[in-house]
Image (cartoon, rainbow, N blue to C red):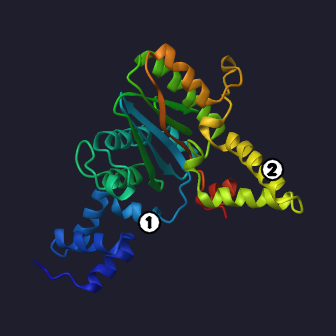
């Protein structure tokens, strides 16, 4: 077998745009034959994937998968919204969610290394999809909820297919009560979460720094007032703030609940469920939130691709 040199790795990287370790592995697998190494990288989808990896991927899909006591939500990004309508991409996102559900893996690096149905890993499946579809794609994040007894409900907003859309929500209700009652409640809460985007389940889940900042704003707005008065203003102001950002304190969006908070609705459902009910957790993913998107001139891109500019 030919010895793989640094110069050979450099040459292969320049020809394919693949990563250094991928080039080294390709050369080792092909006995130092550059052309065979290029083919090896192409078969793995690594050559095209590497060339596209610098592009911003802020579109794509949020995928949700649930079974009775478990639920996961993952975000798989692409460069354009068109890809979200591609059945191969939809199958990729749906399958990654299923892998997360079955393995319990939600840390991106670990989930990426997990076995993908049909062979290879999740990372390799994404690389193959990049090579086939022609856009950069990334597994951005994943999260899960679990209950020992009860239900995990879901809701997908702007769904393009079952379990796939722009916003994905999972809600965990822990209870030994009637499953049908819990499922209906969970669905209502998931819809509410999609609409209101709460920051936390309750005040204990908020970032302490965020709470302190809110206190500071209230104190500054009411500067000069006696200390005992200021304390009451801050206490009242925080209660109003919690109603805005904490799920259990938010008034339900559903008219049938008559303005009751989600916490009150959960408590009042215990009678129908026949057992205590605890709203244990929720996850809400909105596609592309927090990603800095590039401003592009689509018409100019099309013209450039056609050699007109």
Vertical side of 109 occupied by 239: above or below: above
Q: Which residue is mark 2?
A: 233
The image shows residue 237 at horizontal and vertical percentages of 76, 47
At horizontal 55% and vertical 60% (from top left) the residue drawn is: 56
**Which quadrant holds the C terminus?**
bottom right
Which residue is most to the right?
A: 224
Q: Is residue 171 left or right of residue 246?
A: left
Q: Residues within 10 Å of mark 1 (few under 14, many from 20)?
A: some
> Is 82 drawn above or below residue 30 in the view shown?
above
User: 157 above or below 289?
Assistant: above
Instruction: Quarter of the image for the N terminus: give it.
Output: bottom left
Q: Which residue is nearer to you in this view: 120 or 5? A: 120
210 displayed left or right of 17: right
| Disc marking residue 51 | 1
Seen from the viewer's position, the closer of residues 215 and 232 is 232
Pick the residue in front: 276 or 71. Answer: 276
Q: Residue at x 24, y 69 (%)?
A: 37
What is the secondary structure assignment of the residue under circle 2? helix
Tell me the CA gap for discs 1 and 2: 57 Å
Residue 128 x, y percent position in the rendering = 34, 52
| Horizontal and vertical percent position of residue 225 | 88, 58
């Amino acid at each position: 077998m030919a010895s793989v040199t640094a110069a050979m790795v450099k040459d292969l990287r320049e020809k394919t745009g693949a990563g250094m370790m991928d080039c080294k592995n390709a050369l080792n697998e092909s006995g130092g034959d550059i052309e065979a190494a290029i083919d090896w990288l192409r078969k793995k989808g690594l050559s095209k994937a590497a060339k596209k990896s610098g592009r911003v991927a802020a579109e794509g899909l949020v995928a949700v998968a649930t079974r009775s006591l478990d639920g996961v939500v993952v975000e798989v990004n692409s460069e354009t919204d068109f890809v979200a309508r591609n059945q191969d991409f939809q199958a990729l996102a749906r399958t990654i969610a299923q892998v997360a559900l079955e393995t319990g893996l939600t840390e991106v690096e670990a989930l990426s290394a997990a076995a993908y149905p049909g062979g290879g890993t999740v990372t390799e499946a994404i690389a193959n999809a990049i090579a086939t579809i022609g856009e950069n794609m990334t597994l951005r994040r994943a999260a899960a909820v679990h209950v020992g007894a009860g239900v995990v409900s879901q809701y997908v907003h702007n769904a393009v297919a079952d379990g796939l859309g722009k916003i994905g929500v999972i809600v965990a209700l822990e209870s030994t009560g009637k499953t049908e009652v819990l499922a209906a409640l969970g669905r209502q809460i998931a819809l509410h979460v999609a609409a209101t985007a709460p920051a936390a389940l309750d005040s204990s889940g908020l970032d302490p720094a965020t709470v302190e900042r809110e206190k500071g704003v209230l104190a500054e707005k009411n500067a000069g007032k006696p200390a005992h008065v200021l304390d009451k203003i801050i206490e009242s102001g925080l209660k109003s703030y919690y109603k805005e950002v904490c799920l259990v304190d938010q008034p339900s969006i559903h008219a049938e609940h008559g303005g009751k908070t989600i916490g009150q609705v959960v408590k009042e459902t215990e009678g129908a469920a026949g057992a205590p009910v605890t709203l244990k957790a929720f996850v809400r993913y909105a596609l592309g939130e927090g990603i800095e998107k590039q401003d592009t001139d689509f018409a100019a891109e099309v013209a450039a691709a056609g050699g007109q500019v």
